Image (spheres, rainbow, N blue to C red):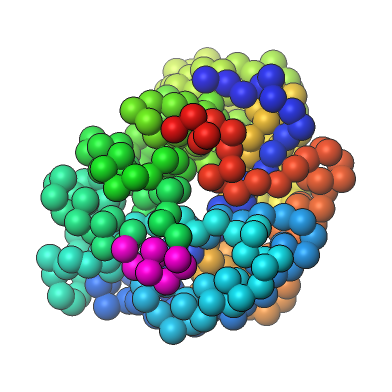
Amino acid sequence: MTDGDVCPPKLAIVIHTEEEFDWGGGFNVDATSVTHGEELFELVQSLSLIGAKTTLAMDYPFVNSVQGQRCIANIKASKEISKKVEFGAHLHPWVNPPFEKKSGFIPEQLSYPGNLDYQQERAKLAELTNIITEQTGTRPVTYLAGRYGIGNNTQQILNELEYKIDVSISPFADYRHQHGPDFRNFNNDISLENNILSWPHSSAIVSPFSFVRNYFNSSPTSYSSESLFIKVLKKIFRAKLHRLSPEGFSLTDMKNLTKFQNTLGQTYFILSFHSPSVKAGLTPYVKNDRERGEFIEKILSFVNWFEESMNGEFITIDEHPLVRKL
């Protein structure tokens, strides 16, 4: 289902709210440190002050940590901030009870929740749902699979645990080389299936040429084709996959994706990034204090631009109008 007939454009900010870990060091059951809670609250507060709303998709180590709980408490303590924040769920199975392994590393395949068997995936999400409900006072309805790892049992489990929205789809991406899902046939279309609203993270093929953008974004599988024609087309017309994120993309990239996609009829956008990036030295995207300042400024500048130049409005994920039909 497309949403091109709805306007003005809407922006939801989804923060993958999680523990800190070595991005190139495997999946360590013991890596559960959270030291960026204060910086995260400061950003959420700054976004709130300029009118933006935030969905915190939180995983177990974050919600179970001292700083995570303090961040949640600070949000709840402010009426102005709390009404602009949604608490969702983000499942990192290797650090989420019940545990199959008490310490050490797990295989990469098991870092995707959808690769677990039904009982394991359900039990872990149930534990996460319970601790979020306990700490926030609200039962989460928005779900983000760790590593975008939805599987064959995910929708059934989401229904059983009373979730309404899944934001795990990463359009055009193919994670099969690391045992993950294949999203090459997905674009940014929002769909409603089995009582679950699937709202993809905003990713799109950008190019200076509108016909190229239209071609690839309306036929997403064509972008991953190995044919010589497609390879030449992408090179000549500078077609590239961009995500609406400050991680690895410039402010100009983010603006272009939004403008181009809005012209093609996309109205609902997700701006996403990982919570540890709000503090220097915790992710590859923010290595020092200078980069941290630039990162925060990029987010705030984009949000201001979206409101002023796109005449955009801000929502949390659970405020999408189709959720009311669920």
For residue 183, above or below residue 180: above
For residue 300, above or below residue 313: below
Q: Residue at x 42, y 71 (%)?
A: 135
Q: Is residue 254 left or right of residue 77?
A: right
Closer to the camera in the image, 230 or 188:
188
For residue 237, above or below residue 114: above
Q: Residue at x 69, y 16 (%)?
A: 211
Q: Is residue 126 left or right of residue 140?
A: left
Counting every numbered tag in the picture gives: 0
Q: Quadrant of residue 297?
A: bottom right
Horizontal and vertical percent for residue 273?
Answer: 56, 57
For residue 215, above or below residue 239: above
Horizontal and vertical percent for residue 70?
Answer: 51, 81
Location of the C terminus (image quadrant): top left
Closer to the camera in the image, 99 or 128:
128
Horizontal and vertical percent for residue 51?
Answer: 77, 56
Looking at this rendering, what residue extends furthest in the right direction?
A: 308
Residue 179 visible in the picture: no
Q: Quadrant of residue 212?
A: top right
Q: Is residue 313 left or right of residue 26?
A: right
Magenta-colored stretch includes residue 19: no
Q: Residue at x 60, y 16 (%)?
A: 215
Dominant secondary-structure state across the stretch colored magenta: helix
Magenta-colored stretch includes residue 131: yes
Q: Residue at x 34, y 28 (%)?
A: 194
Q: Which residues are magenta?
A: 130-137
Residue 201 visible in the picture: yes
Horizontal and vertical percent for residue 192?
Answer: 44, 27
